[in-house]
Every structure is written in C-alpha cells, then in structure tokens.
Image (tube, rainbow, N blue to C red):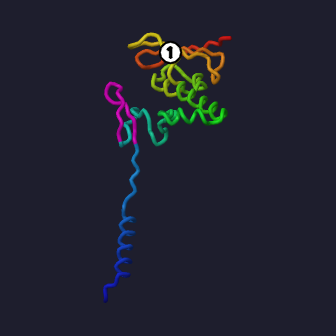
Amino acid sequence: MRHTPTRSRTAAAVLVLMAAGATPLVHAQIYKCSGRGGIPVYQGTPCPPGQELRNFATDPAEVSVLPLPPWPATGGAATSAARTEPSTTRARNAARSERVRGGDPAQRRYLFAGMPAGEVLARAGPPDMKAGGGKSARWTYLPHPGDPQTLTTVTIEQGRVTDVERKVVR
C-alpha cells in the first residue's frame, strides 16, 4: 500500500472526529448551601437535605448591567469645530454633553435604598450639591428638563443609599 497525501488527510480527519466523539460533555452546576454558622458555601455537588440556599441551574443569578455614558471629546479641535458647525448640531451636542455630565436625569426616579453609591453616580451622574462627607453624605439633584419640577435628595451612609426623597417643586 502506497502512502499518499490524500490518505493521510483522510486518516487525520477520521482521528479528529473519533477524538471529538469520545470527549465527554461536561456540565458544571453550582449550588449555594448553608455552611457552619449560616455562612453560604458554594460547591459543585448538591447540598445535603435542608441546607440548599440556591440552585443556580433552576434559579439563575440576576445580573444588572449599567452602560457607561460616552466620554466627552477633549482638545482644541472640538472647540474650533464648534464655531463652524450649524446651530442644530451645536444644540444636539450641548444636550449630549449635558447628559454625559449629569448622567440621565430620567434615572433619578429609579434610585432606591440599598443601592451602592457608585450605581447612583452611574445612573444619575454627579449630584448638583453635596453635603457631609466621610461615612455619610447627602446628595441633591436639582430639577432638570429630563426630570422636571422634581428635587431629588439621596442620603448615603457607608457607601449605600439609606433614603431617597423626591419633592415636586413649582
């Protein structure tokens, strides 16, 4: 029997297919169980009876993803271009930069107690006024066209929101 390149390729393809078919499929599953003193333990085997806190296969974790606002353009080219662009483009860019600076004012109504301070900044942007500092702070968001006639005050203690107060002002 002669050794030819076609037979070698065919034999190699057959070996690859056989190896792929022989590989067992692995399905990893994670279980959250109650350990000593009620401390959660994550493991790859089922929990003993009465100690299961969560089976991630039947009750998947909730994921919250917040998109970051786009970074504003910097440099001299942006300022010189502003002089030559039409007024409608300038108005649109001004609204966009306001949204970037102040976050999304419409998100202020979705702030709640227990939320991390970083998430407040990501959603609503930096506050218009700050009071306090250290472990407790009070952030105030003034009325805005995206959140008209509403004064939002957020109380933060140790990096978490403890109170959100929204007042209608006229």
35 in the magenta segment: yes
User: In the rendered image, which quarter is residue 51 located in?
Assistant: top left
Q: Position of residue 15 (x, y in %)?
A: 35, 72
Q: Is the residue 100 above or below the residue 164 in the image? A: below
Amino acid tagged 1: Trp
Q: Residues within 10 Å of mark 1 (few under 14, many from 20)?
A: some
Vertical position of residue 151 compared to residue 48: above or below: above
Q: Is residue 40 magenta?
A: yes
Q: How many marks?
A: 1
Query: Secondary structure under badge 1?
Result: strand
Q: Quadrant of residue 55?
A: top left
Q: Is residue 42 visible?
A: yes
For the C terminus, the quadrant is top right
The front one of 37 and 146 is 146
Q: At 35% from the left edge and 66% from the top edge, which residue is drawn? A: 19
The residue drawn where x is 53% and y is 32% is: 79
Q: Position of residue 167 (x, y in %)?
A: 62, 12
User: Is residue 66 visible to the viewer in this orientation of the structure?
Assistant: no
Pointer 1: what residue?
A: 139
Start-end of magenta stretch = 30-43
Locate the N terminus and report the quarter of the image it occupies.
bottom left
